[in-house]
Amino acid sequence: MQLIDKLSILADAAKYDASCASSAAPKRSSEGKSGIGSTNGMGICHSYTPDGRCVSLLKILLTNFCLYDCQYCINRRSSDVPRARFTPEEVVTLTLDFYRRNCVSGLFLSSGIIRSADYTMEQLVRVAKLLREEHEFRGYIHLKTIPEADPALIEEAGRYADRLSVNIELPTQLGLQTLAPEKEMGSIKQAMQTIYTGQQTVLNEPKAPRFTPAGQSTQMIVGADETDDSTLLHTAESLYGDFRLKRVYYSAFSPIPNSPKSVPLAAPPLLREHRLYQADFLLRSYGYNAKELLDGPGHLALDIDPKLAWALEHRDVFPLDLNRAEPGMIARIPGIGIRTTKRLVELRRQRRIRYEDLTRLRCVLAKARPFIITSDYHPRQADTSSIALREQLRDRPQPQQMALWA
Amino acid sequence: MIILDCDDLFDTWRQQARWLLSHQIDPDQVSWSVKEDADLFASDDHYPPHNGPFQARVPLELLELLQNAAQYCGDQRWSLLYEVLWRVSHGDRTAMLAGDKLGSEVHRRLKQVSREAHHLHAFLRFIALPPCNVGKDLEVKAALLETQKLPEYVAWHEPAHDILHSASQHFVGRMGKHRWMIATPKDGVFYDGERLIHKRQCPAAWQSLARNADDPHGELWLTYYSHIFNPARLNPKVMQGHLPTRFWKNLPEGPLIPALISEARTGKQRDGQARQIAERRGKVIRSGH
């Protein structure tokens, strides 16, 4: 099979993994050196496909032959898809070619399970090793980790890769039993622990070789089974806490051809996925905890964002005086982000904040208005009930072209 | 009215601004323009060429901010900066802040500039030239390049702001010892493996080398691009927000976009797989391997 044929099959097979970040790597440069590649902590999105997702890394599978039969996965052994397998050298060639063209910032390599977990992991590590050692490649490398692989192999992977990820896919043991019978929550968490331990070992040891300097991440599928948002968010929170994950990705379940009956054949729940990312951002950057966003079972609201939902539930806190409030609380005002909060604090050191400043700072005033006080403004809506406010502020879906799913 | 021309050079503007400030010349009294226009306005003000008595003190961070904002190409490119400098040097530091009316325009420009630098890092595409000892043709071009060596990689890019010189430094770290060249309609850079050479006026030979480079191995990337797209998640609006259409014409994948969108709309949206894969024969793996 020609390289280009393999590429088409193994890129098509890899698109269901949401992660494509090339950020958080340490500063590396090839200036004046042999070899190629640099990283500087910032990710670069080299292109965007018409689904609105960025192309940052060459994201491919080493092979889509797979012994597992995960129901949600297009590459499960019972799936009738064309199969292909790259040699490690072919992956290296493609990575370097795309990298020199400035089409990608590195490689994100995953694989179906062939022969054994150890064998598969060895092959992934071999690609990273070839890139780093034979070709002195200093770009970004993200390797998928096979949970059942020998911890020694995972540790080796962590020395070559900027990022490792172990996909949890379904956050409950029951979900895994039903849809991914070969997978087990215990081994997934064990692999995360191996990576976490590796990171801790080199922490505060500047001379030690780097270990996954861009951290580890995972992915959960949204909408393949009945798992609710509360379970997803509480799982994410404990993963952030237990293993210091850098990111949890949420992947709206995309229908697959010849779909088994066990998973839905419906349009991917993109809005639900979007709300989960918003909530996840509140966990990571705004200091909310999962319990504040979803106390008890259930889903996030689809018609309002989770920050607005929290504010509507906590009207006693608002309106907040922007000239006095703690920065941490200003950031909890709907329509005002962390960056604007910082700018407001800078500005109020110089003078009083006025209403028109918020326009200039590009706050979403429609959302912020009922929750703020400035030196020249007090909200009329302060006494409006939360139900009425929600009715005013909720997102109304744009009228859409008739969907294929109608 | 004083009309100045700084030839779009920050250092020249800086000298002029320092001189204006030393004479306490109000921003209302000055404007920057290109030379041809300058004749249209007669200047009746006469100030001595040497610096005046007023000694302005400004924070170092302001200078950095002005230098970055100066890369922005647009109306009032230089006079806006003088207004900011004027206010800060007279004790009003809010002019540097995004919450201020003037400051917010400065910050908008800064954002545009850094976004444009990012666009260069992201959307520029290098094409490898064939090894350089093959043809007489290339030797001629090498001579035109005014360097001893021909670049190994060339790119054509059309930035909206004057970011090329500073932002192309990024590729020095990225490409190692390789030689590369970026040509634009305005300026150009060439890295010979050791030094980054910037030409304010991109030589025509550079431009033609970059615009006419053959790319016999371009298919792989196009294949990848088509197959990593998930038609079930079609969302062209978000794509256009991140990848403005003005870049499409210089991206090899640009011409593929309309067809991928329409194909997804007319049927392929049902699942994630590309049509070309769905049409091929599949292989179920029997258990027991």
Image: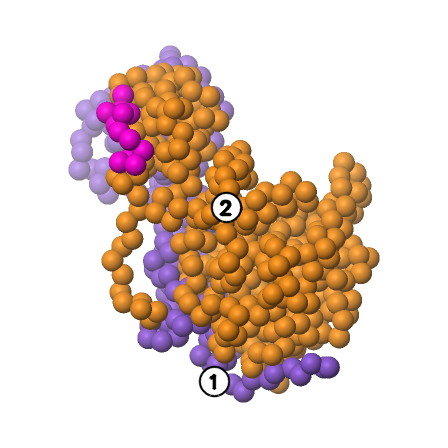
User: As displayed, is residue A321 above or below residue A298?
Assistant: above
Q: Nearer the viewer, residue B194 or A183?
A: A183
Which residue occupies 55% across, 72% down?
Answer: A74
User: As displayed, is residue B202 above or below residue A345?
Assistant: below
Chain represented in orange: A
Q: Main secondary structure of the magenta part?
A: helix
User: As displayed, is residue B49 above or below residue B149?
Assistant: above
The residue stretch that appears in magenta: A378-389
Same chain check for tags 2 and 1: no
Question: Horizontal placement of B229 versus A137: left or right?
Answer: left
From the image, tell me which residue sits under label 1. Answer: B279
Question: Horizontal placement of A256 versus A41: left or right?
Answer: left
Which quadrant does the N terminus of chain B fall into?
top left
Q: Residue furthest top?
A: B53
Which residue occupies 48% across, 81% down?
Answer: B278
Give the amino acid type for the residue marked by disc 1 in the picture.
Glu
Image coordinates of residue B246 in percent, x first then y, are 34, 59
Which quadrant does the C terminus of chain B fall into?
bottom right
In magenta segment, residue A85: no
